[in-house]
Amino acid sequence: MKRIDGRSWDELRPVKITPGFQPFAEGSVLIEIGQTRVACTASIEDKVPPFLRGSGSGWVTAEYAMLPRATVTRTSRDFVQGRISGRNQEIQRLIGRSLRAVTDLSALGGRTFQVDCDVLQADGGTRTAAITGSYVALYLAMHNLANMGMISSIPFKCPVAAISAGIVHDNMFLDLCYDEDFNAGADFNIVMNGNGEFVEVQGTAEGKTYNKETLDSILSLSEKGINELFEYQKKALAAAGVRGMV
């Protein structure tokens, strides 16, 4: 089956990660994957949530939102609704879990790192793009903190990135755009760290169930795409003058 944009079944959309997108933030990037664009910014606060006070541990958390015209039709902002939508809440928790999974929280020195992910344009894979971009934004913030002597080293255990995949009309595709995701019989969001371990696997049979063999193939396909994303993360950090990547 030919894909809408002419890509091969195991090919990522064009990826671009621009560091310093919001210069007032301690760390920031604009990540573009195809037509999906997400601004990721990392801020530092010298406090932790109440449940961590006195523990000596730091914290990493995230917020996620979409601009009203990030999609074809306008979506009201959460504050107009008087509550965070269930979808946004679920995604920001996923981003926070993914970042904490690769962070040595005890090395943050009682600080909270807040990552804000704002979707400027959505064409599928916004949550996975947010995770991939957030790692770079958070790395830049930690790098700046280390340069000021406030922490002794970058408290990351390894990188983290995420990608979508799915089964569309019985065909397996990597990195779904919106039209592919909309027509998928099963869609997946996969988060992995740089050690080749899975942080989170989300797989939903939207219209058709799948077996273990299919799931194994999806995981292998996603691993290929995520390894490519790690290289884009490295390039973005190098462009910001950061050598190497944890």
Image (cartoon, rainbow, N blue to C red):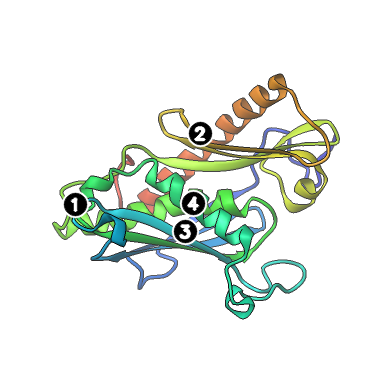
Mark 1–mark 2 contact, CB under 8 Å?
no
Which of the marked residues, 4 or 2, is nearer the chain's N terminus? Answer: 4
- Which mark lies nearer to you, 4 or 1? 1
Q: Position of residue 129 (x, y in %)?
A: 56, 51
Q: Name the quadrant of the N terminus.
A: top right
Instruction: Give the structural element (helix, strand or loop) at label 2.
Output: helix
Residue at image coords 61%, 28%: 219
Instruction: Give the structural element (helix, strand or loop) at label 1.
Output: loop
Which of the marked residues, 3 or 2, is nearer the chain's N terminus? Answer: 3
Question: Alpha carbon of mark 3 to alpha carbon of mark 2: how far?
Answer: 19 Å
The number of discs equals 4
Which residue is identified by label 1?
Answer: 56
Disc 1 marks a residue whose amino acid type is Gly
- Which mark lies nearer to you, 1 or 2? 1
Q: From this viewpoint, is residue 84 visible? A: yes
Which of the marked residues, 4 or 3, is nearer the chain's N terminus? Answer: 3
Which residue is identified by label 3?
Answer: 18
* Displayed quadrant of residue 134: bottom left
Q: Taking 173 as reference, is 92 above or below it?
A: below
Mark 4–mark 3 contact, CB under 8 Å?
no
Q: Taking 230 as reference, is 182 above or below it?
A: below
Q: Position of residue 39 (x, y in %)?
A: 51, 64
Which residue is identified by label 2?
Answer: 227
Disc 2 marks a residue whose amino acid type is Asn
Mark 4–mark 2 contact, CB under 8 Å?
no
Circle 2 packing at 10 Å, graded few (<14), some (14-19), many (20+), is: some
Residue at image coords 49%, 51%: 95
Q: Name the quadrant of the C terminus.
A: top left
Q: From this viewpoint, is residue 154 visible? A: no
Which residue is identified by label 4?
Answer: 95
Q: Position of residue 216 (x, y in %)?
A: 64, 22
Instruction: Give the structural element (helix, strand or loop) at label 4.
Output: helix
